[in-house]
Image (cartoon, rainbow, N blue to C red):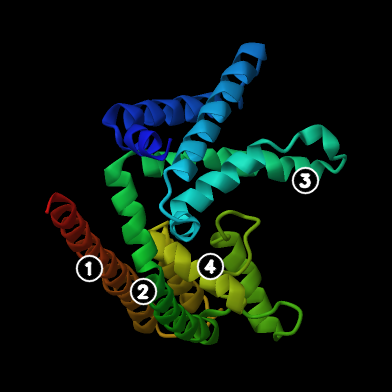
Amino acid sequence: MVELSKKIIAHKAFEKFIAFIIVLNCTLIGVETYFTNPIISILQNITLGIFTLEIFLRWIAKDTIKKFFSDGWNIFDLLIVLISYIPEFIFSNTTIITTLRILRVFRIFRLLRAFPELKLMTSVLILSLKTLFYNGVFFFVFMYLFAIIGITLFKLPNASTTDITKKKALTEYLKQVPNAPGISPDPYGSLGETKFTLFRILTGEDWTDLRYNLIQAKRMNVIDTNETIITIYHVLWFIVATFLLLNLLVGAILNNYQIAMDELRKKEIKNNT
């Protein structure tokens, strides 16, 4: 039984069949967002049964229990299948039912195991998590620094506390240069909003409008910051965030991709010898 199970799960036809079932399952999940009927439910139950059989075969073919559970993919597959067997009618709480449905959608991630290329990319992402965390910390430090500077230099005056001259200038400024969209607050009005503004600049979303608005605010004496400083600030952040920090992330991922490729080649050489 053990040897037969190992032959089945190692066979290329079995791998292709499981890949087809995963694609079919993912398609049905998408179709169910539009409508559902008894045929779709039957097909979903059949795919669930096939997934269960696959896990059972992998369990039978295992060398040891420890080795089976040391493979993260086996744990992931097992959890997804077990969650799929939990009936919704036993819960009266709609939040729990919604959570179950969302977790079942994660069966889509089984595609990552079905194709070697996707599996390699997933391994690269996992290898990169630690690097991405430290890169994220590095990025946050720069964002926090620029956010503090942005609030200090570009925050619009508070209409309820400023003097009459500034208040009049602010009212006129907001008529000429309203925030876009109109419901949005001062882009540099608080630490949280400034961070979002910096993220907006990072995406390239109308970031030049921020500069032009602030230059107009300076010309109308709403803020006191020099126009040159306004330009340098926004261009410098765009360069630092887009070209420096993002390239660090890309470089880290490419480095881990090479590491994953080297490990894959070593495994192939070991299996062939």
Q: Dot 1: within a 10 Å radius of its alpha carbon, few (fewer than 14), some, or many (20 or more) residues?
A: some
Counting labels gives 4
Find residue 180 and report its horizontal and vertical position in percent.
55, 56
Q: Earlier in the sequence, mark 4 or mark 1?
A: 4
Q: Report the amino acid beneath label 1.
A: Asn
Query: Residue 96 — which label?
Result: 3
Q: CA distance from mark 3 to mark 1?
A: 41 Å
Find residue 57 and report its horizontal and vertical position in percent.
46, 37
Relative depth, front residue between 210 and 56:
56
Q: Quadrant of residue 85?
A: top right
Find residue 217 and report its horizontal and vertical position in percent.
51, 74
Q: Earlier in the sequence, mark 1 or mark 2?
A: 2
Q: CA distance from mark 4 to mark 3?
A: 32 Å
Relative depth, front residue between 103 and 239:
103
Residue at numbered disc 1: 255
**Callout 2 touching callout 3 (CB < 8 Å):** no
Q: Report the amino acid beneath label 3.
A: Ile
Give the foreground label among 4 and 3: 3
Secondary structure at badge 2 equals: helix
The C terminus lies in quadrant: bottom left
Residue at numbered disc 2: 131
Asked if residue 20 can be seen in this view, the reply is yes
Q: Is residue 172 left or right of residue 231?
A: right
Q: Residue at x 26, y 69 (%)?
A: 247
**Callout 1 touching callout 2 (CB < 8 Å):** yes
Secondary structure at badge 3 equals: helix
Residue 124 position (above or below residue 169): above
Q: Dot 2: within a 10 Å radius of its alpha carbon, few (fewer than 14), some, or many (20 or more) residues?
A: some
Q: CA distance from mark 1 to mark 2?
A: 10 Å
